[in-house]
Amino acid sequence: MIIEVSNKEIEDIFKKIFNQELKLNIYSKIVAYKEENILGFLIYDDIYDRYEIEYIGVLEEYRNKGIGSKLMEYLGNKNISLEVDTNNEYAIKLYEKYGFKKVSIRKNYYNGHDAYLMVKEV
């Protein structure tokens, strides 16, 4: 099941997955859960004619079980952009599955690592 959550809930989930602090402001947040267990989340911003995915994460023990796909499907058929580490093959494959194309490289975007700017246009 996919639901919207509060800032406090998503901060706790984010810390559990990424082991770091998250500064939230006006982002929309959704989580995937089963029974009472949070499995993953997606944080995005609605900017004019597109969504900008800020973060997506799935707990390691639940990866490759379709949860990331369910989170992506929640966003529906809209223009979407995001940045992804050029070394994150799993995420790149997920995004390509949903029609994202690599449009440029952002040098040193992630603490010395390059990122692809990926865009899905509808």
Image (tube, rainbow, N blue to C red):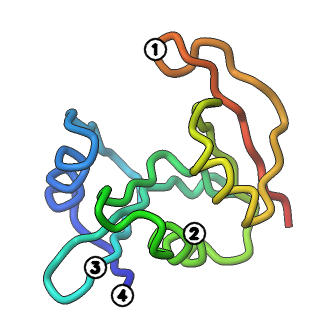
Assess whether mark 1 and mark 4 are in contact (beta carbons under 8 angstroms): no
Q: Amino acid at mark 1?
A: Asn
Residue 29 drawn at (x, y percent): 37, 63
Does residue 83 appear left or right of residue 59 in this picture?
A: right
Q: Amino acid at mark 2?
A: Met
Q: Earlier in the sequence, mark 4 or mark 1?
A: 4
Q: Which residue is mark 3?
A: 33
Please, what secondary structure does the residue beneath circle 3 have? strand
Q: Which residue is mark 1?
A: 111
Residue 12 drawn at (x, y percent): 14, 53
Q: At 69% across and 21% down in the image, what residue appears?
A: 106
Residue 20's place in the image compared with 66, above or below, is above
Spatial distance from mark 2 to mark 4, Cα to Cα?
13 Å
Q: Earlier in the sequence, mark 2 or mark 4?
A: 4
Residue 20 drawn at (x, y percent): 21, 33
Q: Which residue is mark 4?
A: 1
Q: Residues within 10 Å of mark 2 (few under 14, many from 20)?
A: some
Residue 32's place in the image compared with 104, above or below, is below
Q: Which residue is mark 2?
A: 72
